[in-house]
Amino acid sequence: MGKHTYYYQHETDDLVDSHNQSYQLPNDYSIFPTSRIGKIWSVIVRPLAHLVSFVYIRLILNARIEGKEKLAQAGKQGFFLYGNHTQAFGDAVLPLSIIDAKRYYAIGAQANWGIPVLGKLVLPYFGLPIGENLEQSGKLIRAVSTVIKAGKVVVIYPEAHVWPYYTKIRPFSSTSMHFPIAANAPSLCMTTTYSKPKHGSKPKITVFIDGPFYPDTHLDKKKQQQKLHEQIFSAMQKRAEKSNYEYCTYHKI
């Protein structure tokens, strides 16, 4: 994607149309593969996705990742990884350059499952679809609990919509901290920043890892969410201040 100017009314606007945006999964979908072929493919697709991530993140975007050592502080237990959503494809594969491919799951909108190839061959093995009704929401809650108890990692982009190369952190609700509080699990954040390149027009990309942040179990659930939200939002905002180059411009109308 090249330079572009985006116009928005609210910081929660969806500015990028994805293929088959209205796609919804059938109500009886299974989040984890159940067929023999599906289980075999799930073993194969993860190292392949890691390779794609290495090529795209390290060689094409030429992104640098700082603070990966902080992941070790969370130990082998399951944890949550929050990020700012500024790369349409990059954000799908970025975590695979940060965490072990065997541990990676990401919460995403069902429309993503309607994307050709990616939605059929990749997302069913990494993705945890957001529920569109009570039954589906219950399915997601159970799946997240299963993943965390198994010592895996759940990636969440709380801003929801991708704003390409955006250099600030957009507001997101403290309800996006529901899962770490419910699971009593640690959270970390990864903040993608953009700085002036030495050559050309493409920005220099640095991803900063911060955390881990733990639920404050002395507080009630709602206040735990609010505190964790403040910690993660503040850490991401502080890192975002390192961005000093706008590759895409944004104008409020």
Image (tube, rainbow, N blue to C red):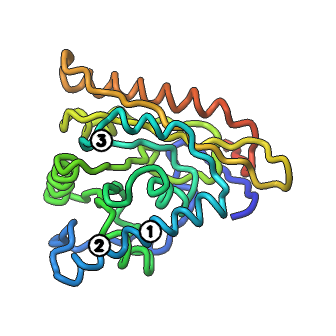
Q: Position of residue 193 (x, y in %)?
A: 63, 41
Q: Secondary structure at mark 3?
A: strand
**Residue at (38% x, 43% y) in the render:** 81
Residue at image mark 1 = 49
Mark 3 or mark 1: name the one nearer the start of the chain. 1
Mark 3 is on which residue type?
A: Phe
The answer to the question of whether label 2 and label 3 lie on touching residues, with beta carbons closer than 8 A, is no
Q: Quadrant of residue 115?
A: bottom left
The C terminus is located in which quarter?
Answer: top right
**Quadrant housing the N terminus:** bottom right
Q: Position of residue 85 (x, y in %)?
A: 52, 49
Residue hosting label 3: 79
Residue at the spot 49% in from the left edge and 73% down from the top edge: 19
Up/down of 109 relative to 86, above or below: below
What residue is disc 2 on? 43
Image quadrant of residue 11?
Answer: top right
In the image, taking residue 189 as reference, residue 140 lies left or right, namely: left
